Image (tube, rainbow, N blue to C red):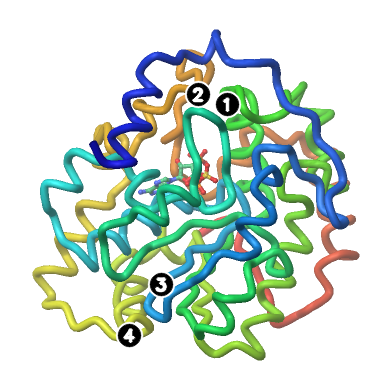
Amino acid sequence: MSKAEELAAVSMSFSPDKFPSRPELFDFHGVSMTHYFTDNWENIQNFQARPDDILIATYPKAGTTWVSYILDLLHFGQTERQTSVPIYNRVPFLEIIVPPLYSGKDLVDNLPTSPRLIKTHYPVQFVPKSFWEQNCRVVYLARNAKDNMVSYFHFDRMNMAQPEAGDWSSYIPRFIEGKLVFGSWYDHVNNWWKKKQTYPKLHYMFYEDLVQDTGQEIDKLCGFLGLSRSDEEKRRVTDGAHFDNMKKDDMANYSTNAIMDFKISPFMRKGKVGDWKNHFSVAQSEMFDEDYKKKMTDVTLQFRTEI
Ligand code: PPS
């Protein structure tokens, strides 16, 4: 039995209502975290990357699963693995450890693919140094703050391994203050953006561009990854990674994941740019924008909240 199959078997015996109580948020080297992402800290820091590893980095809910799915299809095409192994095992989440359900590092260590696609939500300063030493390719995907927050809010409601979401009006100040798992969205997107200036093998992309023109973003990804794929192959990836397709694909929609309560909210929720308008009141939006301007002073980093 492979490591992925072993973990899938354990997962079957779990359900969200049997999961232990929600974790506490605490300060970890200046970033809000929960123990699920710090318990394996030493091992993660000593992680040995390989030169062809590809790191997919995001703030939570920026579209990680989407870009993981795209990279997986671009590299390996539609194989038996795509129809039998959940995306979170094909592209393991390096720093997560939820015993006995999931150890991202164990999964990475047992990945049969080459290259290995590896997911992280770490802020740039937490990334194990071997990724930089090995000069690995890194794909960073960012999403506008308002939609990112809405998506995170619904995720925190339904994921038993996350702190409680609370109500929407109390969630906004927590997002603004960076009091969510993986800390401040503002620091995350800005510090990764700065890293791009000194580390050429970092491809920084935006969720809004991916929604607007998936094909064009796939072209850019192929250029970055040094992949030559026919128009037909690229079209298959674009179509395969469409929201509606991924939503009904049990290997992509997280329905096999034991710690999420889909009765509260689905993982593949809306997949839209601008859903924030259905959540923010005018006053909340104005207050948010005012604070945003103070924090986002680098004019070279611009987000779109509608397309
Ligand atoms: S996680 O838990 O951090 O890994 O979540 P992540 O995958 O980063 O983000 C989930 C949001 O991405 C949306 N999504 C997509 N949007 C458009 N097209 C496709 N194919 C797609 N796949 C995932 C998903 O619906 C979540 O956003 P919301 O706004 O909640 O719908």
The Cα atoms of the two marked residues, 4 and 3, are separated by 17 Å
CB-based contact (under 8 Å), mark 1 and mark 3: no
Res 53 label: 3
Image quadrant holding the N terminus, namely top left
The kind of residue on which mark 3 rests is Asp
Does label 1 or label 3 sit earlier along the sequence? 3
Q: Helix, strand, or loop for circle 4?
A: helix
- The CA span between labels 2 and 3 is 29 Å
List the residue tagged with mark 2.
Answer: 260
Measure the alpha-carbon separation of dots 4 and 2: 36 Å
**Measured Cα–Cα span from mark 1 to mark 2:** 4 Å
Task: Work out how far the residue at label 1 is from the one at label 3, CA to CA, in angstroms.
Answer: 29 Å
Instruction: Single out the mark in the foreground, 1 or 3.
Output: 3
Vertical relation: 199 (above or below) 63: below
Q: Looking at the image, is mark 4 or mark 1 nearer the viewer?
A: 1
Residue type at numbered disc 1: Asn
Q: Does ligand 1 reach within 8 Å of label 1's beta carbon? A: yes
Element on which disc 2 rests = loop
Quick one: SS at disc 3? loop
Q: Is mark 2 within 8 Å of ligand 1?
A: no
Q: First in sequence: mark 4 or mark 1? A: 1
